[in-house]
Image (tube, rainbow, N blue to C red):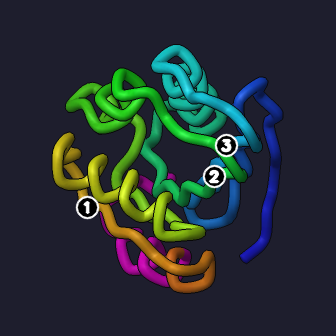
């Protein structure tokens, strides 16, 4: 899958790929804040001209989200920007944190965890019907 455009933010890189898929990678050794999550959402909204995206999330080493950031990322308001999430988990500790996000915050959209980017992208591609391609 080809990356068409990348936006560098302080906390993350946001790569716009073909067919409405966006890959956000949170940088190493970072505690992600709600403001940084919102900035990522606004970047996606601006680049996609208000159309929702299919989001693949990867995180760097020793990076985690604050509880407030997790709550914001899974809020009903976040569904304005994101149609489905694929979270690539890199290790057991990260899987536990992702599980908390999925089970406790219960995002109002399809969300799944994957061991690698390839399976995550395949799953997101199956959800293309959730976004506007125009």
Q: Position of residue 122 (x, y in %)?
A: 50, 83
Using a 10 Å C-alpha cutoff, classify the residue at mark 1 as few (fewer than 14 neighbours), some (14 to 19) or many (20 or more).
Answer: some
Circles 2, 3 touching at the beta carbon (< 8 Å) = yes
Q: Earlier in the sequence, mark 1 or mark 3?
A: 3
Marks 1 and 3, how far apart at CA: 21 Å
Q: Earlier in the sequence, mark 2 or mark 3?
A: 3
Q: Of helix, strand and loop, which one carries label 1? A: loop
| x 79%, y 36%: residue | 7
| x 29%, y 29%: residue | 71
Q: Label 3: which residue?
A: 26
Depth order, front residue of 81/118: 118
User: Magenta region: which residues?
Assistant: 121-134
Q: Of helix, strand and loop, which one carries label 2? A: strand
**Numbered circle sitting on residue 77:** none
Asked whether residue 126 is drawn in magenta, I would say: yes
Q: Is residue 114 left or right of residue 29?
A: left
Q: Of helix, strand and loop, which one carries label 3? A: strand
Depth order, front residue of 88/20: 88
Q: Is residue 49 above or below residue 60?
A: above
Q: Which quadrant would residue 42 be assigned to in this image?
A: top right
Q: Position of residue 94 (x, y in %)?
A: 49, 58
Q: Label 1: which residue?
A: 110
């Amino acid at each position: 899958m080809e990356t068409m455009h990348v936006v560098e933010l302080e906390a993350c890189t946001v790569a716009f790929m073909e067919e409405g898929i966006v890959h956000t990678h949170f940088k190493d050794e970072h505690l992600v804040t709600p403001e940084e999550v919102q900035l990522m959402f606004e970047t996606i909204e601006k680049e996609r001209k208000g159309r929702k995206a299919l989001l693949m999330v990867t995180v760097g080493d020793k990076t985690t989200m604050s509880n407030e950031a997790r709550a914001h990322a899974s809020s009903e308001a976040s569904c304005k920007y994101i149609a489905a999430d694929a979270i690539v988990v890199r290790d057991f500790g990260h899987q536990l944190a992702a599980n908390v996000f999925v089970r406790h915050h219960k995002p109002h959209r399809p969300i799944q965890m994957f061991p690698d980017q390839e399976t995550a992208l395949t799953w997101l591609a199956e959800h293309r019907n959730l976004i506007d391609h125009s």
